[in-house]
Structure formats: structure tokens, C-alpha cells
Amino acid sequence: MGVIIDQSAKNMFTTYLGFGIGAINTLFLYTNFLTPEYYGLVGFLLSASNLIWPLMAFGVHNTLVKFYSSYDTKEQRDKLLSVILFMPLGIAAILGLLGYFAYGLLLDYFSDGNELVKPYIWMIFVIAVATAYFEIFFSWSKVNYQSVFGNFMKEVFHRVCISALLVSVYFRLLTVQEFIFGISFVFVLRTVIMKIYAFRLYFPKISLSFPQNKSFILKYSALILIAGSVAMVLLDLDKVMIERFLPIEMVAVYGIAVYISSVIAVPSRAMHQITYPMTATLLNKKDKKGLEDLYKKSSLTLLIISGFIFLLIVTNVRQLYELIPDVYQLSFSIVILISCVKLYDNLMGNNNSILFNSDYYRLVLAIGVVLAVLAFVFNLVFIPLFGIFGAALATFLAFALYNTAKLILVKQKFGIQPFTVQTFYGLAMVTVFTFLFYFWDFPLHPVFSILLKSILISSLYIFLVYFLKLSPDINNLIKKVLKLK
């Protein structure tokens, strides 16, 4: 876990830096520099592209991670990388032609609801292609155990660029329409930079032939394509369906709640960059003991860190909403509900890495497809009934079922599970702290109230984690940060 903690710490720093910049964009720049309608439009375009890009990538970014370490010769690795480069290009060309001939139908679809979307539909395709290739080049760097720069590009770069674009709108250097076009350019630029970096790490000899296990690679890519699409459906379907049933500004209101809660997912995203290729290596070597150890440690480490972030968000959510315009106010229960989803995701540890790099990914696919359909039905029923709270409820139910099914699957097929006694101590501590501090507010300006409560929670939480020795890895990290002997 030493290597994991080291790179995860660097990735977590860049990820939180990115989320910090994103928080400024989401809570202050977007809300003050754009109207709610245009803010909702941006959220819809990005969510729609997130639904499409896994189809563009055809699952090859995961295929690269799974199979790269299984090839021992440069020739076979070059053939694999060549396939990884060219396959998404063909998929994108086919989808581009379909989109071109169906463009009139797309315009008719948005004629009944939010007309604002119609001039920008093509951007969904551009952002999706750019994101697909970015993920491929990011995986390219991860298989070489160099994830820090890619994580910076994924979490920080585009958010800094969007901040600059928003400031340009404020100073009237750009129109709102030019700003939206500029977003697609930022995603393309990010992909180009990531490509240059990946090629500097390893430049393959281009080959037009498949490596060994061609049929297995194609089957795996096709199934991971659907599995990846399922994951993105569960993440972004709610925002896309809100656009269909509610005014587009509601996408912005809901998006703020989702963004606040998504900060809890940062530790998992940071650790995932290094645990994913390591899990693939352990599975290829059939090292069950090492796999179980990694599973338990990753789950416990993520619970302790994400539980701390969960506390800071849930106990300060009321003061946080006092800092943004009233038009974006909503029920705090939405933030809490989605925050519980993110905490559960972290509790899973490297569960996804185990399943998607094993021979049981077909079962994950079947489960995911069923739950994606359920998520669609949940949104279809709950959004008209409960508005944006219905979208949060649909997301909560879908992810709770999906995560539970994956835990059961790993237990049945591998005979391992991520929980220990320390896991229940950690959950109990998070629960007690939540009820203790949620209703306790300082009668001060929201910023000072958030700071004071956060300092108090941080001090008590870190002390208890260290004193109870819940995780040796976390204790070593605390010692390192605080310079303790």
C-alpha cells in the first residue's frame, strides 16, 4: 500500500485542487456570471456527452489496463496499443454519420421543450469524442504507473480554463454563446495535451494486426462498453431527464447539489488511478491473498477519508447554501441523499477494479443493464411526482442496488469481502458525528460558521482515527503530515 498511498496522495491533492476550482465555478462564477437557463444548458451538454463518450471509446481504455500487463513482448503491446488507437475512431465515424442524418430528428425532439439546447446539440458529439480519447491516453499513462499528470489534466486543467472563460464573460470579452463554444475547445485541447504526454511515455510502432487473444479483446471491449455506459447512465441520466420534464434551469439547481456531494468521491477517484492497474496485475498473477489485502485496505482507507469529507459537507450544507443566490436553493435532503450514495461508493474499495478486470465482468454487465433500466424507470416515475428530489431518490435507489449486487458478486466468486471490525467502528463514528454536529450551528456569518465547525470536526475526527488506530496506513499518513514520531 505504500506506493498506492504515495500516488493516491498526489492524485488526491490534484483532484481536490480541481474540485476546489470547480466549486468556485459551480457555486460562484456560474451562478453570478450566467443566467440559470444557460447554466442549466452547460450542465445538460456535459451530462449528455458523458452518456455518449463510453460508446465512442468502445471500452478500450479499460481493455488497455486489463491486457497490457499480460503481454510480455513489445510487439504484442504495440499491436494492442494500435487497436486501442484506431477502434474508437471507427466508432466515432459511424456515430457521426448517424448523427448527421438524424440531426433533424434531434432538433424536433428539443422543439417541444427547451429550445435553448437546439443550436448546441453538435457540441455533445465533439465533447464526447474528445473525452473518449482523453480517457484512452490517460489509461496509456496509468499502465506505465504514471497517473499524476493525467489526473491533473482530468481534474484541474479544464476547470481552470472554464474559470478563465467565465471571467471573460464577466468582463464582456466573450459572449455567452462564445463561452459555450469555448467549452468544447477546452475538452479538445485537453485531449491533445494528454496524447502528447502519453506518446512521450511510450510511443508504439503502429501495427494493423491484432495482438494475441483477438476475440477475447473484442468481446471484453464490447462488454465493458456496455458496462461503462451503464455506469455513466447511473451518474448522468438524472440530469438529462430533468431537462426533459422540468425547466432547464432546474438542471443547474440539481447540478449544484450533485457537485457538492461529488466531493466525497474524490478519494475513490484518486486511489482508483493506481489501484486499477495493480488489481489487474494481481488478478493476472492469481494472487488471491494480495487481492484480498488490497480490497480490505482500500475500502477502509476510503471510508475513513470520505467519511470525514461526508461530515464536513452534511454538517455545513445549510450554511453553504446561504452563500449562493436564492434561485439555486433546494431541499438539503437532496444533498444528504446523494452524499450517502458517494459514501457507499467509497466503501466499495477497489470492487470495480476486481470485477472489470476478472472473468466475471459479464455478470456485472447483466446486473448493470437491469439497474440502468430500473434507474430510467425510477426517474420516469419520481421526477414528475417529486421534481428534482425525485431524481435524487432515483439515483440513490439505483446505486444502492447496484453497489450491493457487486459486493455480493465479489463475495460469491472470489470468497472475499472488504469489511473488517474497523469498518463498523468507522461507520459508527461517522454516524455519531453527523447527528452530533448537523443541528449545531454557530450564530456567525456562514463562512466563519463553516470554518469553526470544520476545524472542530477535523480535530476530533483525526484524533479519534489516530487514537483508535483504525488504519495503519492512515496513521502513518497522519504522522507524516503532522511530523509525529
Image (spheres, grey):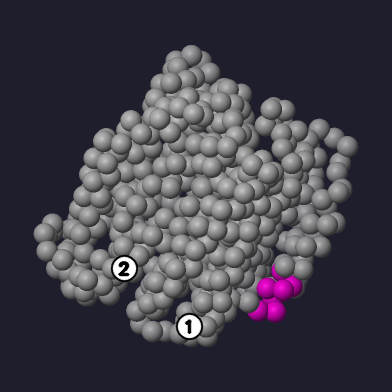
Q: Is residue 378 left or right of residue 315?
A: left
Q: Residue at x 77, y 54 (%)?
A: 457
Q: Which residue is mark 2?
A: 220
Q: Residues within 10 Å of mark 1 (few under 14, many from 20)?
A: few
Q: Which residue is mark 1?
A: 413
Dominant SS of magenta comes to helix
Q: Which amino acid is tagged 1?
A: Lys
Write the start and end of the magenta stretch as one range. 420-426
Q: Which amino acid is tagged 2?
A: Tyr
Quadrant housing residue 241: top right
Q: Residue at x 39, y 72 (%)?
A: 362
Quadrant housing residue 472: bottom right
Q: Residue at x 37, y 63 (%)?
A: 224
For numbered disc 1, what is the local secondary structure? Answer: helix
Q: Residue at x 49, y 32 (%)?
A: 42
Q: Position of residue 171 (x, y in %)?
A: 51, 15
Q: Position of residue 212 (x, y in %)?
A: 18, 73
- Point out the residue furthest to the top here: 172
